[in-house]
Image: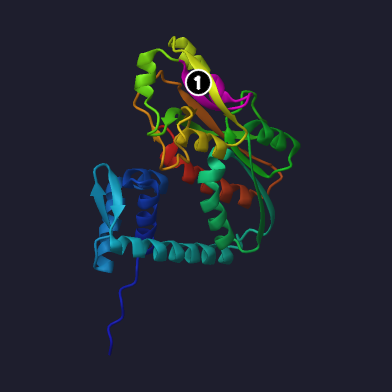
Amino acid sequence: MNKLPASLDMDALRSFVAGVEYGSFALAAQRLCRSTSAVSAQLKKLEAQCGAELVVRQGRKLALTPGGEIMLSYARRLLALNDEAQRALRSELLNGELRIGMQEDFGESIMPNMLSQLSRQHPGLSITARVERNRVLRQAAIEKTVDIALLWQPEQAIDEAEYLGECPLAWIASQQIAVAALLASGEPLPLVMFDTPCQMRSRAIAALDGAGIAWRVAFTSLSLSGIWAAVQAGLGITLRSPIGLPPYLHVTDAPLPAAGTLGITLWQNRNLDPKAQRVLHDSISGALVPFLLR
C-alpha cells in the first residue's frame, strides 16, 4: 500500500504567503495577529512537510528558493479555494456590482492583485474599476458614483472616510540625472510634476523653497505613467511615495529636504453590503501594510 503524501497545513501556508507578500515575517505576524516566533515556527513546519527550504534571507529581505517559487503559486491557489469554501458555507460569497476607484499610485500597484483576488474568490461579483487623480476620486465619492475609493488624504475631509495610515514621500530620480551635482552647481533643480492642484507638487515646492534650493518645473504630466516616463528619460526628479515605484527608478540619496508624509484614506459607501465592506477593507488595508509607517 502506497504511503499517502503529507497534508499541507493551511495556517502554515497562510503564514508563508503573508511573509513573502509583506517581505517580512514580522509584518506577516502583525497582519495575522500572531507572534513572530509562531509564524517562523509555521514556516519551519511547512518546509518540513515539503521536504525543501522555501525562503532564504538576503540581507534584510526574504528571497524565494526555486522550491519556494513553486510552492507560492500552489499556496495561493490552495488558500483561495479554502477561503472560498468557507465563505460559501457561511453564505459570504459576494454578488452583484461593485464600483472601485483608486488614485493612480494605488491603481498601478495595489489594484491588479486586488481585482485578481476578488474575481477568484467571488465569481458572482461584477466589478467596474477606475483609476483617477485625487480630486476626481474625491468628487466621485461625494457623488457616490463609486462604492469604494482609495485615495491620498484630501485637504478637505470626506464623510464616511477612514484614515488608514501615512506613507513617506521621497525624491525619485533615474540614473541619467546627477542630482547631487546639480545641487552643487546651483542650477535650478528640474522637477517632473502633475499639473495643479497636486498635494505632492505643493509639498515639493514648499520643501525646496524652505531649504533655499532653486527649482524649475521641467515637465508637467496629466498621468502617473507620464511622470515615470519623464523621470526615466532624465528630464528631472519628482516627489512621490514609494508605492508602485518602477524598478528602473530609485529614491535618490542626494541631500534634498524631507517632504514629510501623506495620509491614505479609504472611503466606502455605507449603503454597501456590510460583508462587502469588511472584505474590501481587509483586502486593501492588508495590501498597504508594507508601505505604511509604523
Question: In what element is the residue under mark 1?
Answer: helix
Horizontal side of 260 relative to 65 (left or right) equals right
Looking at the figure, which quarter contains the C terminus?
top left
Q: Residue furthest right?
A: 143
Q: Position of residue 232 (x, y in %)?
A: 46, 36
Q: Position of residue 153 (x, y in %)?
A: 58, 29
Q: Position of residue 278 (x, y in %)?
A: 58, 48
**Which coloring applies here?**
rainbow
Name the residue nearer the viewer: 84 or 21. 21
Horizontal side of 247 relative to 277 (left or right) equals left
| Residue located at (29% from left, 64% from top) | 67
Question: Is 197 within the magenta?
Answer: yes
In this picture, is 174 found above or below 261? Answer: below
| Residue located at (42% from left, 31% from top) | 173
Residue bounds of the magenta highlight:
188-202
Name the residue nearer the viewer: 273 or 48. 48
Few, some or many residues within 10 Å of mark 1 (<14, 14–19, 20+): many
- Please tell me in which quadrant of the rendered image residue 31 appears: top left
Question: What amino acid is labelled 1 in the image?
Answer: Ala
Q: Is residue 202 visible?
A: yes
In this picture, is 12 found above or below 266? Answer: below
Horizontal side of 155 relative to 242 (left or right) equals right
| Residue located at (49% from left, 16% from top) | 215
Question: Is 30 within the magenta?
Answer: no
Q: Position of residue 126 (x, y in %)?
A: 67, 58
Q: Is residue 255 visible?
A: no
In this picture, is 270 found above or below 253? Answer: below
Horizontal side of 91 relative to 168 (left or right) equals right
Figure label count: 1
Q: To which residue does mark 1 refer?
A: 204
Looking at the figure, which quarter contains the N terminus?
bottom left
| Residue located at (32% from left, 47% from top) | 25
